[in-house]
Structures are given as structure tokens and as C-alpha cells.
Image: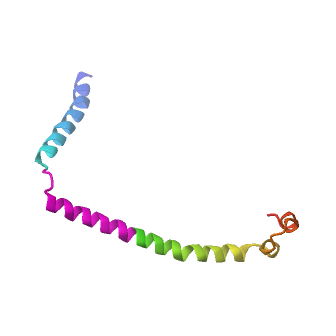
Amino acid sequence: MSDQFAQMADIPREFLRDGTLFINRCTKPDKREFIKISQAVGIGFVIMGVIGFIVKLIHIPVNNILVYASLPPYSRHTCHQQCCFDRYRL
């Protein structure tokens, strides 16, 4: 029983030891490396934003066309009078 407890307690201890060794081996980036990393991340954000914008730009009209085509004819009424809202309420 105590052997199992020792093994269970050894796992976090080994994890912490490996983590501290890893952190001690790491170095901070210098100014030039930090600027390069920041530029790469910024360019990635811009590219992902442009891709998202293009996808949204294409899919919103397509979705509206599909939804509008699937609606029954009486719900496509474009009059904005109150009587029409009562009559053609979805």
C-alpha cells in the first residue's frame, strides 16, 4: 500500500523536476527575435481575419438566398403596413 502511495507521489515530483529543468534551459528572446515573432503573429492574425472576412462575405448572401428561396410565398411579402404584419406573421 505504501509502495503504491510512493509511486503516486513520485509522479508529480518527477513532473515538477522536469518542468524546472525545462524552464532553466529556456532563454528569453532578444529584441530582434521578439520583433520577428511579433511580426509573424501579426501577419497570421491579419491573414486569418482576411480569410474569415472573405468566407463571411461569400456565405451571408448565399445563406440569405437559400433561406429566402425556402420560405413560403406569403412570407415574402414586402409591405410594411401593420395589417400585413398581422396577416403574414410567421
Horizontal relation, residue 62 to residue 30: left or right:
right
Q: Nearer the viewer, residue 50 or 1?
A: 50
User: Considering the image in quadrants, where does the C terminus appear?
Assistant: bottom right
Q: Pinpoint residue 89: horizontal percent, then vertical percent.
A: 82, 64
* Residue 73 occupies quadrant: bottom right
- Residue at image position (68%, 72%) is 67
- Residue at image position (47%, 75%) is 54
Tag count in the figure?
0
Q: Nearer the viewer, residue 64 or 86?
A: 86
Q: Residue furthest top?
A: 2
* Residue 40 occupies quadrant: bottom left
- Residue at image position (64%, 74%) is 64
**Magenta span main SS:** helix
Q: Nearer the viewer, residue 44 or 83?
A: 83
The part of the chain drawn in magenta is 27-48
* Residue 23 occupies quadrant: top left
Q: Nearer the viewer, residue 90 or 14?
A: 90
Is residue 10 located in the magenta-colored stretch of the structure? no
Horizontal relation, residue 86 to residue 3: left or right:
right
Q: Pinpoint residue 72: horizontal percent, then vertical percent.
A: 79, 73
Q: Residue furthest front?
A: 81
Horizontal relation, residue 42 to residue 36: left or right:
right
- Residue at image position (26%, 25%) is 5
Q: Pinpoint residue 38: horizontal percent, then vertical percent.
A: 25, 62
User: Considering the image in quadrants, where does the N terminus appear?
Assistant: top left
Is residue 35 located in the magenta-colored stretch of the structure? yes
